Image (tube, rainbow, N blue to C red):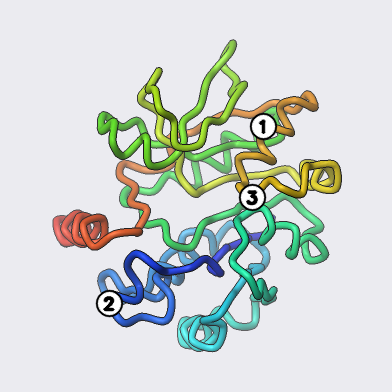
Amino acid sequence: MIGLILVAGNNTRIADYLDYPSKVLIPIGGKSLLVRNMDLLSAYVDRFVVVVGKAENDIREDIAQSGYSNRVTYVRQNVASGTLDAVRLAMSNIHDDVFLVLGDEFIIGNRIKSMIEDYNAKDVGISVGIIPDSDEVYIKDAYTLHYDGGYVDLFIEKPKDIFNRDRGTGYYIIKKEIFELLPNLDSGKKDIVDLFNHAIENGHKVVSFTVAEEEFNINTIQQLEKAKSAFNCLS
């Protein structure tokens, strides 16, 4: 399995305010968000592919200090044009199933090992990490999933209406065959969930899995403070 980590996005909401070259370099408990996510996957992937953008040099330095450099292949995304474009750019480096992570994610009480075991035990194309969440505002700022017979049959980005409490996260396991659908996908599509919906339309089974006890997508100061507070409660 390959760990694919996307870290090329713009940082307009938080990193500039905190004076970091990329929000994935913001530390919690002495480690950057990026390195924490690499730590989560390290025991389960053979190598990493990291899609970088304008903060490439700083990200390379952070990874070097963590000791992961010899396991990393870097891919450059010059324009932050969405997660789907980042995945397209990484395709030549992907020859196995992928654990894809958005680099600004932070989780507590992770169930990564159990998620991988569940994926391996099922004949599915995609497993999506979710958090059962009671906060409608947070769900509407992410994406949710619709189910049919135990499988996901639709992903809805930033839903206007809430029909369940499953909030999508930035943790995904994807069978390598799914990426063969990319050339047939409308070039105007920008988000990874567009690929997932396309996979469903082409007959691939998709499941969800509760990936952690708590999850924070670090886009605002408020989310960062909540993540730090939750982390400090563990100390």
Q: Residue 5's x, y, as percent?
A: 58, 63
The tag earlier along the polypeptide, 1 or 3, is 3
The tag earlier along the polypeptide, 2 or 3, is 2
Number of residues whose C-alpha sits closer than 10 Å to that of mark 1, classed few (under 14), some (14–19) or many (20 or more): some
Q: Is residue 54 left or right of residue 70?
A: left
* Residue where numbered disc 2 is placed: 18
Q: Residue 56's x, y, as percent?
A: 56, 82
Q: How many marks?
A: 3
Q: Residue at x 61, y 55 (%)?
A: 83
Q: Is residue 162 left or right of residue 122?
A: left
In the picture, the quarter occupied by the C terminus is bottom left
Q: Element under label 3?
A: loop
Q: Residue at x 48, y 68 (%)?
A: 10
Q: Nearer the viewer, residue 32 or 201?
A: 201
Furthest residue to the top?
Answer: 149
Q: Residue at x 50, y 47 (%)?
A: 113
Number of residues whose C-alpha sits closer than 10 Å to that of mark 2, classed few (under 14), some (14–19) or many (20 or more): few
Q: Kindly identify the amino acid type of the residue bearing the numbered disc 1.
A: Asn
**Distance between the alpha carbons at the discs numbered 1 and 3:** 12 Å
**Distance between the alpha carbons at the discs numbered 2 and 3:** 27 Å
* Residue where numbered disc 3 is placed: 190
Q: Which mark is residue 54?
A: none
* Residue where numbered disc 1 is placed: 197
Q: Residue 7's x, y, as percent?
A: 53, 68
- Res 68 quadrant in image: bottom right
- Res 126 quadrant in image: top right
Between disc 1 and disc 3, the foreground one is 3
Q: Element under label 2?
A: helix
The answer to whether 74 is drawn above or below residue 226 in the figure is below
Q: Residue 13's x, y, as percent?
A: 34, 64
Q: Kindly identify the amino acid type of the residue bearing the numbered disc 3.
A: Lys
